[in-house]
Image (spheres, rainbow, N blue to C red):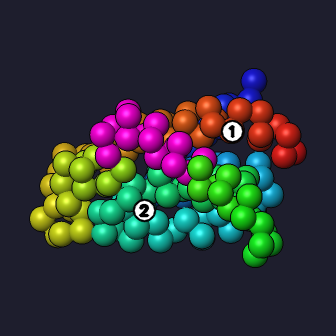
């Protein structure tokens, strides 16, 4: 039986990719983005965007997936632009409901943009204990919001 995309995303993260890479490299290929390209595109978004402890990589990865699915491709397509923004806002609301924040520093309880915060995160093994849950939840929320959209896109 084929592994679910949710489990695939979690496993990808556990194998050493960032939260953003795990999400985009799992769902991107389902929407026409090559896996290697997805890994490269999402590469700078880990640990709250370049380890700046901002928006969680699982969240930014999900936003990129939403863009692949709903993003506008014509400058005057305001309807598609608004749809994409609306789905991003719904995703953010659901993630916030589960975790109280979208910010890496708040989710982890340490600021990985500072050497002492990064050292603390590593000491407490946060990347291996907390972050897989954020990847899982981001993937679950994506699947809830996308419904049958992935199957329709194939």
As drawn, the residue found furthest toward the bottom would be 75
Q: Nearer the viewer, residue 57 or 85?
A: 85
Indicate the position of residue 26 as horizontal and vertical percent values.
65, 48
User: What residue range appears in magenta?
Assistant: 87-101
Q: Is residue 60 left or right of residue 129?
A: right
Residue drawn at (60%, 64%) of the image = 39
Q: Secondary structure at mark 2?
A: loop
Q: Which residue is mark 2?
A: 46
Q: Which residue is mark 1?
A: 146
Quadrant of the snapshot with the C terminus: top right
State which quadrant residue 139 falls in.
Answer: top right
Q: Secondary structure at mark 1?
A: helix
**Are there few (<14), some (14-19), or many (20+) residues within 10 Å of tag 1?**
some
Indicate the position of residue 125 as horizontal and vertical percent values.
25, 46
Residue 89 visible in the current orientation: yes
Indicate the position of residue 93 as horizontal and vertical percent values.
44, 41
Q: Which comes before the other along the chain, label 2 or label 1?
A: 2
Residue drawn at (30%, 40%) of the image = 100
Indicate the position of residue 47 as horizontal and vertical percent values.
36, 61
As drawn, the residue found furthest toward the left would be 116
88, above or below 64, in the image:
above
Q: Is residue 72 left or right of residue 112?
A: right
């Amino acid at each position: 039986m084929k592994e679910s995309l949710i489990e695939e995303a979690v496993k990808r993260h556990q194998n050493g990719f960032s939260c953003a890479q795990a999400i985009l490299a799992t769902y991107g290929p389902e929407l026409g983005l090559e896996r290697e390209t997805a890994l490269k595109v999402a590469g700078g978004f880990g640990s709250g965007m370049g380890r700046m402890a901002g928006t969680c990589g699982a969240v930014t990865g999900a936003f990129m997936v939403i863009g692949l699915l709903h993003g506008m491709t014509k400058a005057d397509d305001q309807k598609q632009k608004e749809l994409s923004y609306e789905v991003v806002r719904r995703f953010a609301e659901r993630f916030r409901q589960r975790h109280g924040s979208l910010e890496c520093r708040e989710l982890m309880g340490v600021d990985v943009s500072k050497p002492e915060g990064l050292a603390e995160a590593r000491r407490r093994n946060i990347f291996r204990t907390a972050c897989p849950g954020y990847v899982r939840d981001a993937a679950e929320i994506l699947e809830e919001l996308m419904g049958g959209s992935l199957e329709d896109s194939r």
